[in-house]
Amino acid sequence: MAVSPDAGGNSPTDVDWDALRAAAVEVMHRAYAPYSRFPVGVAGLADDGRVVVGCNVENAAYGVGLCAECGMVSELHATGGGHLVAVSCVGLDGAPLMPCGRCRQLLWEHGGPHCLLLTPEGVQPMSQVLPQAFGPDNLSIAGGPA
Ligand SMILES: [Zn+2]
């Protein structure tokens, strides 16, 4: 099991991974996935201790379906903002599920390089999950985000 946050990162031992995954499993059962029949749940620990969750929400127009991470990030901001420090994403079997490429970008934006993710290979920081990521720092070169 890989547990290797980079320097200055969050400590995997400070996270109740069982509780986070249980929250992800619970919300996974509320997913709206009539087309793929592939429900996904995700739970994130915010830097102030809140746990925010999301589930995937599909659409008859497949391209506008929402990944679980979209809902979680929306709840993060709707309930006070802050940053994610740890995330657990699960599929129907409750096992760790890797976020898609787009959602890795979402997690990078709202958790940064030190945010921890429970992966099938153990806990990994986002700096390993999305190496050489494009992010807010890149925009600061051009004067920063608006
Ligand atoms: Zn996704």
Image: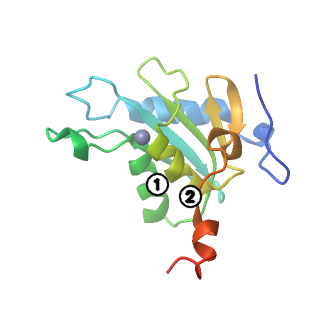
Q: Residue 110 carries which label?
A: 2
For mark 1, give the secondary structure: helix
Q: Mark 1 points at which residue?
A: 73
Indicate the quadrant containing the N terminus: top left, top right, bottom left or bottom right: top right
Residue drawn at x 63%, y 39% is 129
Residue drawn at x 84%, y 54% is 8
Crowd band around label 1 with a 10 angstrom C-alpha radius: few (<14), some (14–19), many (20+):
many
126 is higher (above) or lower (below) than 34: below
**Could you tell which of marks 1 and 2 lies nearer the N-terminus?**
1
Crowd band around label 2 with a 10 angstrom C-alpha radius: few (<14), some (14–19), many (20+):
some
Task: Say whether marks 1 and 2 touch (CB < 8 Å).
Answer: yes
Q: Position of residue 109 (x, y in %)?
A: 56, 58
Q: Position of residue 101 (x, y in %)?
A: 48, 41
| Furthest residue toward front | 142
Residue drawn at x 46%, y 54% is 73
For mark 2, give the secondary structure: helix
What kind of residue is marked 1? Val
Image region (quadrant) for ligand 1: top left
Q: Is residue 77 left or right of residue 65?
A: right
What kind of residue is marked 2? His
67 or 101: which is nearer to us?
Answer: 101
Q: Where is residue 39 in the image (x, y as percent from the top left)?
A: 35, 28
